[in-house]
Image (spheres, rainbow, N blue to C red):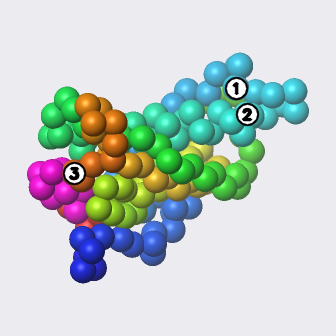
Amino acid sequence: MNGNGIVSSDEFDLSDRSTYSHWHQVTIRSTDEDPLGHVNNCVYASWIEVARVMLIRRYLAVAGNDIDTALVNLSIDFLKETTFPGNVEVGARLLGIGNSSIRSGYGVFRDGQCLATSRCVNVFFDLNARRSTVPNDEMRAIMEQDLA
């Protein structure tokens, strides 16, 4: 942690399965394929969304009903194509904790191969005040444990 209360690590290889402790399986649908015969790139974002929401729900569970998060940045690196039918596994992990934001990383895997990696930034958002907010101490403790 630095003097600003920010905890961070960019030393994670998002293409390595051992990087992740949170996993979500997603079924590939026939409608996910594009005219080229492979899963369309935009579908990867929806797979990552499943893992991102489930990861963040762990933190929001201790936040009360007035706090949520807003996605402010999403980047995806596409490494390999895939096709229907089948399943993918999406690994999720926290990469950094800011004052009112978190950075998270994801890997999409099939048959042991990494198909894509992703990085996201979410800001904690006060639903009543309609502005960013700082996570409470209990949330921060859970996030710091996840980052460790």
Q: In this view, does 101 lie to the left or right of 31?
A: left
Packing grade of label 2 (10 A; few <14, some 14-19, many >=20) is many
| Label number found at residue 140 | none
Q: Does the magenta stretch include residue 140?
A: yes
Determine which quarter of the picture holds residue 137.
bottom left
Q: Do the residues labelled 3 and 1 touch (CB within 8 Å)?
A: no
Q: What stretch is highlighted in magenta?
A: 136-144
| Disc 3 to disc 1, C-alpha distance | 36 Å
| Label number found at residue 32 | 1
Q: Element type at marker 1?
A: helix
Three-letter residue code for mark 3: Pro
- 86 or 34, nearer to the observer: 34
Q: What is the magenta segment's predominant secondary structure?
A: helix
| Label number found at residue 39 | 2
| Whole-percent x, y for residue 97 in the image | 32, 62
Query: Mark 3 or 2, which is nearer the eye?
Result: 3
Query: Mark 3 or 1, which is nearer the eye?
Result: 3
Q: Is residue 53 above or below residue 16?
A: above
Residue named by callout 3: 135
Q: In this view, does 71 lie above or below 21?
A: above
| Disc 3 to disc 2, C-alpha distance | 37 Å
